[in-house]
Amino acid sequence: MIRFQIKGVFIIVFLFLTMSCQDPNVTNAVPKGVVSSAHALATEAGIKILENGGNAFDAAVAIASTLNVVEPMMSGVGGYGTILIYDSEKKEVRFLDSSGKIPLATNADLMRAPTPGYMQNRRGAKAVSTPGNVNAWYAMSEEYGKLEWSSLFETAIYLASNGFPVSPAMEQLLAVSFNSFSDYSKSFYGKNGSPLRSGDTLRQSDLANTLRIIAKGGPDAFYKQEIAKSIDTAMRKSGGFLAYHDLEDDKAEWWDPIRIEYRGYEVYTASPPSTAFPSLIRLGLMRMFDSLKIHNSVEYLHAFAEVSKNAYLSRLTYAGDPEIKPPPLDLLFSEDYLQKTIETINPEMASEFKMPGASVTESMNTTHFVVADQWGNIVSATQTLGNLFGSRIMPEGTGIWLNNSLAYCTFEPKGNPMDAIPGQRKLSGDCPTMIFIDGTPWVALGTPGGHTIGQTVPQIVMNLIDFEMSLQEAIDAPRISFIEPSSLAVERGISQETISGLKKLGHHVKWVDGLGNAHALLIHYDASNNIAGFEGAADKRGEGMAKVLKQ
């Protein structure tokens, strides 16, 4: 990457050659937008909205609803998430929280030892929390959208009704999950008593009908009418805590984002009640190191691993509902705190991580997408069901998988800020992110991956800024993640020599095939700061697609 600065305006020029051809996701034509998501059909759904004159906010609803259909195990109307938006007219970044509140009847003691079956209670009906996605999609559409709400579901409804081919990845996920499905859900995801296989057509007629109802009736159709009653009935039958009144009372909430300066760039992410703030702490700590010039060297990865431990500890110590016990972000982002933290890191030895409470392994089964339009509006959204197919509960007649959000609470010690406290906000670890240059949005990105999310995102940011990688290179580069209490997950693309060096420093290395499934976009500007082009990138670790829409 070659970067020029002319009169305070950065012009980014990427020369990325593949097979002697220009990257198809980069265009010099006057652009209309870009989408990157975890499934090609969802990307095309967003592109179609942009082609029809919709903006990024319209396209985001179409992408999210289509992902519900083509990635039903990852996200959907029964799930929750975290959305970061940029409004180009007001030049404003906002955070839209769809993680909802914990059901009022929740008894978290049933998800703690020594209660018999407490681990199963964390996975199934008792772990279902209020699904906030539909309210969030509608809030975004109402405030910022251009097109009619009902038109945003056309692709999702078509694909749910008419079907699409099962991919090899979905075949594997169905194979490991199918035996836990009800007979009702097996009727969609199986054939002759066995799970669908790659190439089979997945049709979800009841989901198509549910989406039609939502498209016609808006969020009230989901939260206050027959769908809500079906969910309430399913919860009563299965012993869940979620009830009709929790659905009826759900609201999408807008919050101001948080940000930190990193080497002249402004990096934004979701504020509490999200627990994305440790990703910014990691960047704040890493900017203290000026000598780490070699990407994925032993010294660099050791520093990041130690920084990650400190940042993760801050999450476990300080996370909280901002209206009850807000994290002390002014302290955590202060130069004094960051400098004192850096001074505790031993460059020649891995530290022992001490948990302040019980650890929790978060789900890798999430999705992320990004979209930008010709006016410069941006959406970066992470959405999930929690575990694979969520709680595995599908209310009959709906085709909806319900989340198991409460599985990712921290149950020890009782009453800690991330416990499943009835009526309080669910604290999500999603980390949708935007990078700005001189007040202008440059990159939007995010990834699934449970608690590795807040480690993957900073590595991509540093790849772009410190190591001047192209967008695709920054996402595809091998990465690491600290896994509590003592493991360092390392992708196989990192050299054996580096691994040996990390082991000598005392790191307990654990080989992994992949961390996350990131998606990102980048905006190019001309000398007058007008949009000159878009770039999109989909992680090689997944099956997604990035596409630029040309004029």
Image (cartoon, grey):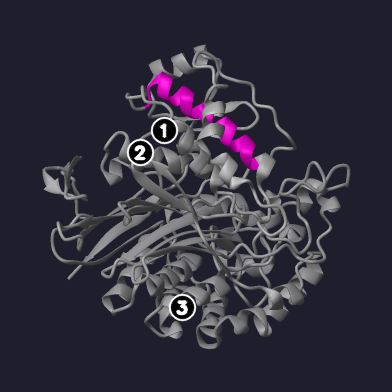
Q: Is residue 549 left or right of residue 386?
A: left
Residue identifier under label 1 = 287
Q: Quadrant of residue 33?
A: bottom left
Label 2 CA crowd tier, 10 Å (few <14, some 14–19, many 20+): few
Residue identifier under label 3 = 143
Label 3 CA crowd tier, 10 Å (few <14, some 14–19, many 20+): few
Q: Do we see residue 430 in this rendering?
A: yes
Among the two numbered marks 3 and 2 on one chain, the one whose residue lies closer to the N terminus: 3
Among the two numbered marks 3 and 1 on one chain, the one whose residue lies closer to the N terminus: 3
At 43% across and 47% down in the image, what residue appears? 517
Q: Amino acid at mark 3?
A: Glu
Q: Do we see residue 360 in this rendering?
A: no
Which residue is nearer to you in this view: 117 or 462?
462
Q: Quadrant of residue 36?
A: bottom left
Q: Is residue 251 left or right of residue 460?
A: right
Numbered disc in front, either 3 or 2? 2
Which residues lie in the magenta part?
296-315
At 51% across and 78% down in the image, what residue appears? 208
- Per the rendering, the mark at residue 541 is none
- Per the rendering, the mark at residue 263 is 2
x then y, percent, for residue 526: 16, 58
Q: Amino acid at mark 2?
A: Arg
Disc 1 to disc 2: CB gap under 8 Å: yes
Q: CA gap, disc 1 to disc 2?
A: 7 Å
x then y, percent, for residue 295: 34, 27
Disc 3 to disc 1: CB gap under 8 Å: no
Q: Is residue 448 left or right of residue 411?
A: left
Which residue is nearer to you in this view: 272 or 518?
272
x then y, percent, for residue 233: 76, 76
At 43% across and 29% down in the image, what residue appears? 288
Residue at the farthest left position: 20
